[in-house]
Image: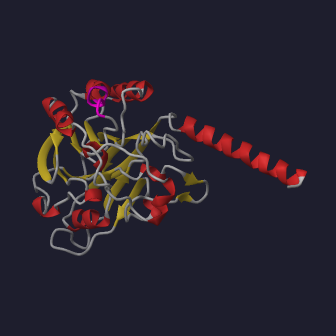
Amino acid sequence: MSSRAWRALGAAALLGAGVLAYARLEADSFRLRRRDLDVLPQGHDPLRVLHLSDLHMTPGRRGLQDWVASLAALEADLVVVTGDFLAHREAVEPVAASLGPLAAVPGVFVLGSNDYYAPRVINPLSYLAGPSDLHPDRPQLPWPDLVDRLEAWGWHHLPNARKTVVAGGRVIDVRGVDDPHIERDDYALVAGSPDASADLSLGVTHAPYLRVLDAMAADGVDIALAGHTHGGQVCVPGLGALVTNCDLPRDRARGISAHERPLTEFAPHDQPPMWLHVSAGLGTSPYAPIRFACPPEATLLTLTARG
């Protein structure tokens, strides 16, 4: 090999090492996003919703634990967590400590596949071939203990369930599904038009699969919240996410988008689209602790009156 080739190879190796080092640092550069949505009935004061997702907590992630705990200073009216709290058998206590300062705020949550099953090493290139599969020999995590802790605060677990929640003086009709990524969803159990007496209809899912979003939109849900995608986790500047790990289009891998409604009795032609917010999440698999052009995030959604 010529000296020029050796120099080029060395430069490429240094560049790769630099990118990897940056991606590791970015995985700990937590951000708070603030977004406004005009989704409430006219005349209503704003409602502040803190959306958290994909903590993938391990006992050693003290920086993440402290940062999540600091979000109590936002004084949100409602906390919504869209799954994948855990990434370790001993993570229930760290999750509870992180979210504990928010315990007095009304909350709803669903679980993700990584709450049920322990993480494992996966070839990252396999995500380019399509959504990941559940490996049959993954050990289970203590998700019932997590659910018990959160429900003791008065938070509502929504595994294919509906609840009426009062937050910030508003009545919210909330429906959630268990994780569609591992086919635990059964939307029929929560289907139907929103409660006419509610000020807001909210849908919650871990993975934003289109079959769930379409069903929520058809039923007249005002806004749906999801996680799972990690925003792509490794993105290309100017191009965005390479994958979503589900059937949601890549250009909707994170942030707010409008989900068009089919024409049904619950969603008449003059009803605006259902809003969708996908969180890029706060964590990563412990076996791939990197992010690139997609920093970890929580989002404070301020819901305001239409018009």
The range drawn in magenta is 89-95
Where residue 44 sits, quadrant-wise, is: top left
Image spot of residue 93 (x, y percent): 27, 26
Image spot of residue 43 (x, y percent): 24, 47
Quarter containing the C terminus: bottom left
Q: Residue at x 11, y 55 (%)?
A: 195
How many labels were placed on the picture?
Answer: 0
Q: Is residue 63 magenta?
A: no
- Tell me if 275 is positioned left or right of 150 in this view: right
Quarter containing the N terminus: bottom right
Q: Residue at x 51, y 58 (%)?
A: 125
From this viewpoint, is residue 207 visible? yes
Where residue 59 sits, quadrant-wise, is: top left
Along the line of sight, the residue nearer the viewer: 1 or 32: 1
Q: Is residue 91 magenta?
A: yes
- Tell me if 44 is positioned left or right of 255 in this view: left
Where residue 67 sits, quadrant-wise, is: top left
Q: How is the image coloured?
A: secondary structure
Q: Residue at x 54, y 57 (%)?
A: 240
Image spot of residue 196 (x, y percent): 10, 57
Along the line of sight, the residue nearer the viewer: 134 or 257: 134
Q: Residue at x 23, y 43 (%)?
A: 109
Image spot of residue 239 (x, y percent): 58, 60
From this viewpoint, is residue 170 visible? no
- Tell me if 9 is positioned left or right of 81 in this view: right
